[in-house]
Image: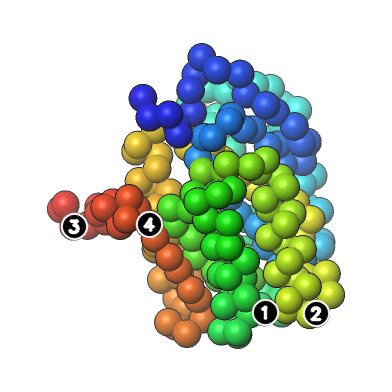
Amino acid sequence: MSRDHLHPDKPIDKHGFILPHWKQDEVMQFVTFRLGDSLPNEKIRHWRHQKLLWDKNNPEPWTPDQFAEYHRRFTWRLEKWLDGCEGSCLFREAQNREILEAVLMFDEGAKVEHHAWVIMPNHVHLLFKPLAPLEKLIQAWKSLSARRIGRGSIWQQNYRDTMIRDSQHFANAVRYIRRNPFKARLPVGDFTSWESERAKGVPDKRDNA
C-alpha cells in the first residue's frame, strides 16, 4: 500500500455537512472548486435539498450500490452542470489561467505535491498530495488568485474533495482530469492542464484496447 493512498487502519479527520470533507495526513486528494457564478442558485438549492433527503434515507455506512447511486445522482450531475460552462467563465481568458497556474505551483514541493490539474472556464480539478492543511491550501489559492485577477470575490466558498484510495483510483482521477476539457468540447485555448511525470505514466484505457 502506498503511503500517499488512504490507509484503512489510520484515523480519518471528518468535517463539513453539505459537502463533507475527509482527510488523512499526506494522503492524495482529488479536489474540485468553482467560480461563485458557475451554477445558478436555484439549481444548487434544489441539488442540496435532494442530497439532504437522500442522506437522511441512506445513513452510512453505504453499500456499493448506494455509493454508486450517490455519485450518479449528486457528484456526476454537478460535474455535468459545470461542464456546461455557465456564468462569467473568467478562465476562458488565458491571462487569468496564467495567474491561477502561478498561484497553484508557487509552493510545489514545499506545501503541496501536484500530480495533475486542469483549469476549466468556470472550475478547477486538481490531484495532489497536501503537505500543509488542505483547507488552508485551498483558501490561500482562492484568495491570492482572486486578488491578482482583481475582480473581487470570484470563488464559491466550499470545495469538493475525495481521498485517493489506491493506484487504480489515482489512475482514474488522472484520466478524468485529462479528458475533462474534451468531454466538455472545449477548444484548446479555453483551458490549461498539467501532469507530473507520475501522472504522465498513466495510459488512457483506449491505449490498452
Image x and y of residue 47, in percent: 73, 50
Disc 3 on helix, strand or loop?
A: helix
Which residue in the structure is indicated by mark 4? Answer: 196
Q: In which quarter of the image is residue 15?
A: top right
Q: Is residue 150 left or right of residue 164?
A: right
Question: Which residue is tagged 3?
Answer: 207
Name the residue type under label 1: Leu
Q: Do the residues labelled 1 and 2 touch (CB within 8 Å)?
A: yes
Residue 20 position, x and y percent, is 70, 36
**Residue 151: which numbered mark, if any?**
2
Distance from the alpha carbon under mark 1 to that under mark 4: 25 Å
How far is disc 1 from disc 3 in space, using C-alphas?
34 Å
Disc 4 or disc 2, which is closer to the eye?
4
Q: Which of marks 1 and 4 is in front?
A: 4
Q: Tell which circle, 1 or 4, labels the residue nearer the N-terminal end.
A: 1
Task: Please name the amino acid that badge 2 sits on.
Answer: Arg
Q: Give the mark toward the camera: 1 or 2.
A: 2
The image's mark for residue 90 is: 1
Q: Three-letter amino acid code at disc 4?
A: Ser
Label located before the other in sequence (4 or 3): 4
Q: Nearer the viewer, mark 1 or mark 3?
A: 1
**Which residue is nearer to you in this view: 163 or 176?**
163
Q: Which residue sits at x=71%, y=45%?
A: 135
Direction top: furthest residue: 9
**Left or right: where does residue 187 sit relative to residue 143?**
left
- Residue density around tag 2, few if under 14, some if 14–19, many if 20 or more, within 10 Å: few
Q: Which residue lies furthest to the right in this view?
A: 152
